[in-house]
Image: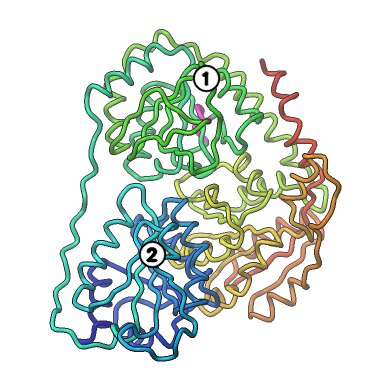
Amino acid sequence: MKASDLFINALENEGVEYIFGIPGEENLDFLDSLKNSSIKLVLTRHEQGAGFMAATYGRLTGKPGVCLSTLGPGATNFTTPAAYAQLGAMPMMMITGQKPIKQSKQGRFQIVDIVELMRPITKYSRQIVDGNRIPAMVREAFRVAMEERPGAVHLEFPEDIAAEEIGKERVFEVVENRKPVADNITITSAAQMIEESKMPLLLIGAAANRERTSLALSDFIHKTDIPFFTTQMGKGVVDERHSNFMGTAALSANDFIHAAIDSADLIINVGHDIIEKPPFFMQANGTKVIHVNFFPAEIDDVYFPQLVIEGDIADTIQKLSKAVNDLSNWDLSYFDRVKINVEDHLSKYSKDKRFPILPQRLVQIVRESLPDDGIVTLDNGVYKIWFARNYECYQPNTLLLDNALATMGAGLPSAILAKILYPDRKVISVNGDGGFMMNSQELETAVRLRQNLVVIILNDSAYGMIKWKQEGMGFANFGLDYQNPDFIQYAESFGAFGHRPKSDEEFKTTLDKCLDDDGVHVIDLAVDYSLNHSILNVLLKEKTKIL
């Protein structure tokens, strides 16, 4: 048996369904072994797209997504997806090729120390130097990738090791690690803090996005009637139509939801850690925080919780539901007023039909056009804030955004992966024109896979997020405008369908039709960000009116 055959067997043993990537000369033995496997190869047009697909697979399934590249430039193109998965807690395995290590083939041509390059941005990075070690290394890499906090792992597979004949054929049994649970003394202390508080709030973050945790949180909210809010990456864990949902902290301070956050005397933080941009800043002698997560709190100037509950989150919440009984000290009436003001503010422009379209109106139309289980994937840009604040999620993992690395270029690959996993669900990829062009070549991948996918490009011919920051900080408008291609012709050149609506009503009609039709549809949508500054930069003055 060749070592490359054993590698494929080890991946099959882990339940791998897909490998995303671009093989090179150094992967040809691996590719030859893959052709007879149950694992499907999804050929992409750039390694970065493959990495984002693998990371999103990990995010949606909880199992490592696998991506493949050759050595040198192919491998270095994985660095951004590696950081994306590592910071976003998405399990992912990268397999990269390398020249023969037992003898020189072409000197130092294309050789970069990828193992060391990956080490700071992964949980595990190793070179395979003995084919007999493959089963153990694959099993360990998968274990580490899924272990809390999940993240990226990397194995380098040199060309001569892949081709060598080996004696072992053994693979290791996949053993599920049981997560530790919180001790009863800590649960009792937390219950006491909750019962003694007067205005508690529940915060839901990304690590709570697990089925058991979602159910446990719903039960906890039902029993206690506690108001809750989310981080950007915690959206949808609990149905946001719930009467106790206060909103999403899309900004770190001075949003309307911060009227509630600043007035709370206790925040029960379930599943948020400081790698995601903070939804609030802790102050000395300010609001107390209980940290509930699979891992301990990482102390920072803006985050230093008074109580840490480490262990399985669902188990912790179930125990708290039983332990918290006396709520007579609570007075939540102020939060009711905040909720009314938040909802009034968020709905202000949702029916404004001016064109180019306002982002608030865009969010409203997308929400109305999608069923409960429809999926929206976002690239990174100022529109992400509007979706985080204004888009109601009815189910987990139906708004896929990144608020950890916050990279551009991930929106379209994420949508392609979502459609691979859920071919019968409606999927919309929303991108700024800048982010779209960073991985727009993956349109060909979507077309080749015969996907039914809608891609919206918000066209303002500029890096809009930075322009908003530039304006807000008092700088002159400079250095952020560019020219775009004709996106209709561009889409059609890939075999997709291009659309350019000229009004609010035409956009809504076009979107509904594209969602119902087969094929990849690209909508070039003119967007108006002119109100960003007046709305997002002056919230502090408006927020005080609620007090």
* Picture coordinates of residue 543, whole percent (x, y): 69, 23
> What percent of the width, then of the height, locates residue 23?
44, 82
The kind of secondary structure element at disc 2 is: strand
Residue drawn at (43%, 22%), measured in percent from left and top? 225
Name the chief secondary structure element in magenta: loop
Magenta stretch, residue numbers = 241-245
Name the residue tied to disc 2: 65
Query: Which of the two labelled residues, at mark 2 and mark 1, occupies the earlier sequence position?
Result: 2
**Residue 284: mark:** 1
Measured as percent of width and height from the top left, residue 513 is found at 65, 64
Count neighbours of disc 2 (C-alpha within 10 A) and say few if under 14, some if 14 to 19, many if 20 or more: many
Image quarter (top left, top right, bottom left or bottom right) of the C terminus: top right
Where on the picture, by quarter, is residue 455? bottom right
Three-letter residue code for mark 2: Gly
Residue 330 covered by magenta stretch: no
Q: In which quarter of the image is residue 114?
A: bottom left
Quadrant of the rendering where the N terminus is positioned: bottom left
Furthest-top residue in this view: 328
Residue 245 placement (x, y as % from top left): 52, 30
